[in-house]
């Protein structure tokens, strides 16, 4: 039984493929005009597959010798995975071929390296022509109210914070995300400009819309969640961003791995205090 579980769990490498669809392919397709009905359906199937792997992993951990549940879940898993392949080959890819231009395929290809590949030797990344934004001077100082920083230093600071940050503007569009080392949740540049509700699994959309509505009408200023994700204990917080007049200007999402923090007890003073 353990051997069978181990073999099935190797299929979990398909996660990279699903993540690329959700964070790169779907955003590009949405920008082509029209939210295809197949997108939320496919994302739901992705989640069904993830749940099946989680159940199989649980059975493997318990070390059950015989399990009718295991064979039932394996059947559901293969049905979902093959249904996904069918939808991709007959619906998703033919639609994409009709609307995407060559440079868009190239961009998606290069963004894929940030997530990884499933069951293949990673291909070579193509060298893309670097486009210089002449309107941006990274040495220019930005007044932050309590200090001034150049753009280069500001980027470094944001990407060295021990949290994932995503900012959604007042129109519910993603306009920024940080790129810290070991980011918790997958993000790609394709999501910039995307409606934030489309960046979440279909089952979470209503919750996202409820939070945004409460921020906009002023009934709430903060929402907090804690989840177990990828063997980590994650704190996810949403903050309503308002200007000095109280006008809603957007939402800040902050995610942090608190696995080790949750284990802390007692005090640990500064080294200077410890030596004194």
Image (cartoon, rainbow, N blue to C red):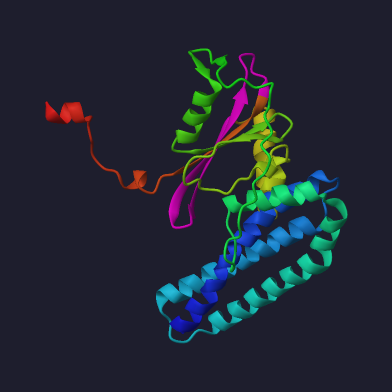
Q: Is residue 247 magenta?
A: yes
Image location of residue 231, percent across then percent down: 44, 57
In the displayed structure, would residue 239 be above or below residue 140?
A: below
Residue farthest to the left, as pictured: 276
Q: Provide residue 68's location: percent of width, then percent of height.
A: 54, 85
Q: Nearer the viewer, residue 69 or 170?
A: 170
- Quarter of the rendering containing residue 117: bottom right
Near-viewer residue (125 or 266): 125
Q: In the displayed structure, would residue 74 be above or below residue 220?
A: below
x, y (%) of residue 16?
Answer: 60, 60
Q: Is residue 68 magenta?
A: no
Task: Point out the image quarter for the C terminus.
Answer: top left
The answer to whether 41 is drawn above or below residue 70 in the figure is: above
The extreme right residue here reads 98
Q: Main secondary structure of the magenta part?
A: strand
Relative to 181, is 191 on the left or the right? Answer: right
Count of all numbered marks drawn on residues in the image: 0
In the rendered image, residue 202, in percent from the top left (x then y), is placed at 70, 54
Residue drawn 53% across and 71% down? 55
For this rendering, which residue is in front, 208 or 47?
Answer: 47
Q: Is residue 151 above or below residue 189?
A: above
Q: Residue at x 67, y 44 (%)?
A: 128
Q: Which of the 4 image quadrants contains residue 129?
A: top right
| The magenta segment | 221-248
Can residue 132 be seen? yes
Q: Is residue 201 visible?
A: no
Q: Residue at x 15, y 31 (%)?
A: 274
What's the residue at 50%, 82% (across, down)? 4
């Amino acid at each position: 039984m353990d051997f069978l579980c181990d073999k099935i769990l190797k299929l979990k490498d398909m996660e990279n493929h699903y993540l690329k669809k959700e964070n790169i392919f779907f955003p590009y397709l949405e920008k082509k005009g029209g939210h295809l009905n197949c997108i939320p359906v496919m994302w739901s199937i992705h989640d069904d597959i993830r749940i099946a792997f989680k159940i199989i992993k649980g059975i493997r951990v318990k070390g059950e010798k015989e399990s009718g549940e295991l064979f039932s879940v394996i059947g559901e898993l293969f049905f979902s995975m093959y249904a996904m392949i069918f939808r991709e080959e007959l619906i998703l890819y033919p639609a994409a071929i009709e609307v995407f231009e060559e440079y868009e395929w190239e961009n998606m290809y290069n963004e894929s390296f940030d997530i990884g590949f499933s069951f293949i030797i990673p291909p070579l990344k193509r060298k893309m022509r670097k486009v210089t934004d002449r309107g941006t001077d990274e040495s220019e100082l930005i007044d932050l109210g309590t200090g001034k920083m150049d753009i280069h230093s500001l980027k470094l600071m944001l990407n060295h914070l021990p949290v994932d940050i995503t900012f959604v503007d007042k129109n519910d569009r993603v306009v920024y995300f940080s790129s810290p080392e070991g980011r918790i949740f997958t993000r790609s540049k394709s999501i910039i400009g995307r409606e934030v509700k489309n960046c979440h699994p279909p089952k979470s959309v209503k919750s996202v819309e409820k939070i945004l509505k409460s921020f906009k009408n002023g009934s709430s200023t903060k929402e907090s969640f804690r989840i177990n994700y990828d063997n980590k204990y994650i704190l996810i917080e949403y903050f309503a961003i308002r200007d000095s007049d109280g006008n809603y200007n957007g939402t800040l999402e902050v995610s942090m791995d608190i696995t080790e923090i949750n284990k802390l007890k007692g005090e640990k003073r500064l080294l200077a205090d410890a030596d004194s």
